[in-house]
Amino acid sequence: MIFALKKGRIRSMVRRYTVILSRAEEGWWVANVPVLHATAQGRTRSSALARAKSLIRFVLNTTRAEGG
């Protein structure tokens, strides 16, 4: 994530989110992002994690667009 700071400087800021991966009974992988109260799923572990990352980006972009 890149954020603009004072005097036109741009710095990179790292944010870390806990993602809890578990296997559903149906065989799908579930990725829970507790701090966002959000869940993503995928047929594979890597696809569930990729969808969780996309979900986090979406929430951050939406929050920023709304002035939060």
Image (tube, helix red, strand yellow):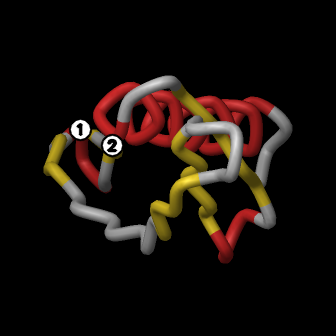
Query: Answer yes or no: do the residues labelled 1 and 2 have beta carbons within 8 Å?
Result: yes
**Residue at the disc numbered 2:** 4
33 in relation to 2, above or below: below
Identified by mark 1, the residue type is Gly
Q: Residue at x 65, y 52 (%)?
A: 24
Q: Residue at x 38, y 29 (%)?
A: 44
Please name whichever residue, 48 or 58, is drawn nearer the observer in this view of the structure: 48
User: In the image, is 30 to the left or to the right of 48?
Assistant: right
Q: Tell me the element at label 1.
A: helix
Q: Residues within 10 Å of mark 2 (few under 14, many from 20)?
A: few
Q: Residues within 10 Å of mark 1 (few under 14, many from 20)?
A: few
Residue 60 locus on image (x, y percent):
61, 43
Corner quadrant of residue 15: bottom left
Please name whichever residue, 54 or 4, is drawn nearer the observer in this view of the structure: 54
Discs 1/2, front: 2
- Quadrant into which the N terminus falls: top left
Please name whichever residue, 53 or 14, is drawn nearer the observer in this view of the structure: 53
**Residue at the disc numbered 1:** 8
Residue 65 locus on image (x, y percent):
74, 30
Q: Residue at x 85, y 37 (%)?
A: 66
Please name whichever residue, 60 or 34, is drawn nearer the observer in this view of the structure: 34
- Quadrant into which the C terminus falls: bottom right
